[in-house]
Image (cartoon, rainbow, N blue to C red):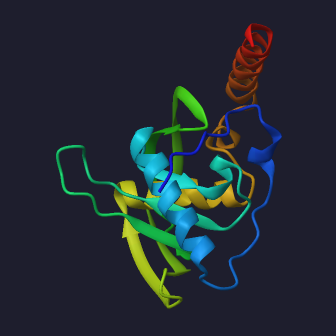
Amino acid sequence: MAIKPLVILPDPQLKRVSEPVTTVTPDIRALAADMLDTMYDAPGIGLAAIQIGVAKRVVTIDLAKQDEERSPIVFLNPEITWESEEMALYEEGCLSIPEYYEEVERPAVVKVRYMDLDGKTQEVEVDGLMSTCIQHEIDHLDGVLFIDHLSKLKRDRCIKKFAKQAKERERGA
């Protein structure tokens, strides 16, 4: 399909709450394909539609390493239906906050209900990196960034850095 430009912090679109997908249409399938192309090109392991400027509740994830066969999953309207009390700490990054990484604590195991590209409701229980990734992407659908889970000092420092870079890009354009 097509590689789309990524929405980068401090773009206010990243704080928008995404709209549910009501029906799997050719446009939704094309959006998912574009998201996968964009995610692989970046390269990343997860992408929410809002990160390419589309406020729809669509997430793509593929945890395959570069030397492994791709195994993409498309989640439409994903929602966490259960989370473990046990927590896990992972270093997270984000394609919309390039080259910035911080440790974030999230539930270690979650159950996620979603609609697949055939319009069927699915439910999966995930742990490890998949658990962290799906929680990160669902946060995007709700206008929440991984830096929102950090201390105010770290978050403010990150936002200031990216706001400065955006101003420099504007001046150079």
State the quadrant of the C terminus.
Answer: top right
- Residue 117 in picture, x, y percent from top left: 49, 80
| Residue at screen point 47% across, 69% down | 74
Q: Is residue 57 above or below residue 15?
A: below
Q: Is residue 129 above or below residue 82?
A: above
Query: Is residue 3 in view from this perspective?
Result: yes
Image coords of residue 112 (percent x, y): 51, 76
Q: Residue at x 52, y 56 (%)?
A: 34
Work out whether residue 131 or residue 71 is closer to the camera in this orientation and state it: 71
Q: Is residue 37 above or below residue 170?
A: below
Q: Residue 22's image quarter?
A: bottom right
Who's the residue at 70% across and 42% down the image? 148
Residue for point 60% across, 66% down = 58
**In the displayed structure, would residue 126 be above or below residue 67?**
below
Left or right: 72 in relation to 57: left
Q: Position of residue 160 (x, y in %)?
A: 76, 19
Q: Is residue 130 left or right of residue 161?
A: left
Residues 147 and 46: in front is 46
Asked whether 12 or 36 is in front, the reply is 36
